Image (cartoon, grey):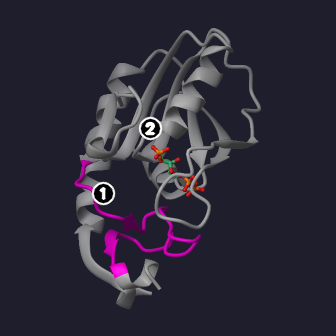
Amino acid sequence: MHNDIARVLITEQELHDRIAELGKQLAADYADKDPIFLGVLKGVVIFFADMVRATPIRSQFDFLVVSSYGSGTTSSGHVKMLKDVSCDIQGRHVVILEDILDSGITLEYVTKHLLEMQPSSLKICTLLDKPSRRKSSIIADYVGFTIENEFVVGYGLDYDERYRNLPYVGILKPEVYSK
Ligand code: PRP
């Protein structure tokens, strides 16, 4: 698995340190708000687990499952909701947690859907932001790392459902996805 990685982009230590900083920021901003941390599965699963533990305040979890990438490296542009939220978010402070904001098509769909449920506030916290690829007006409120236009895997992010369990964020060798 590690042999398919051209280069480590963000190390375990860098992830740990940045998430600690983001956690302090979220804890300060949401101290008395009892927020719902809403993870967009599956890519967020590792970041979610680390992020919520770095944010030691009264809070609630929920998840939704969407998919738009299929087995390719670019978004199909069609977002499928595979599982909706399971709690009532009306009147609540919601923080969407995502692993990566790329074209923004996924979060555009998700935020539009969630706003219909009338939360008190809705913010976005993404581990990775690739602004050069944006095809929507979505802007994240909390960003772990802004990255260049490279295809990254690991720490939850996949290529064809593989590499999610790498402990770092790495750049996949192009020959792996051009096979
Ligand atoms: C990935 C990622 C984001 C989305 C970002 O999800 O987890 O949800 O793509 O891309 P966008 O900004 O271009 O829409 P994917 O559809 O691959 O599903 P996954 O979370 O199960 O990996």
* Residue at the disc numbered 1: 16
Main SS, magenta region, reads loop
**Amino acid on which the number 2 mark rests in the picture:** Gly
- How far apart are the alpha carbons under marks 1 and 2? 25 Å
Q: Give the range drawn in magenta.
A: 146-174
Q: Can residue 36 be seen in this view?
A: no
Residue 138 on the magenta span:
no
Q: Residue furthest bottom?
A: 3
Circle 1: residue type? His
**Residue 2 visible (yes or no):** yes
Split into 4 quadrants, where in the image is the N terminus?
bottom left
Residue under label 2: 104
How far across and how far down the image is residue 47, in percent? 45, 53
**Which-is-in-front pick, marks 1 and 2?**
2
Estimate the x, y position of residue 96 in percent, counting from the top left: 51, 33
Q: Is mark 2 on a helix, strand or loop?
A: loop
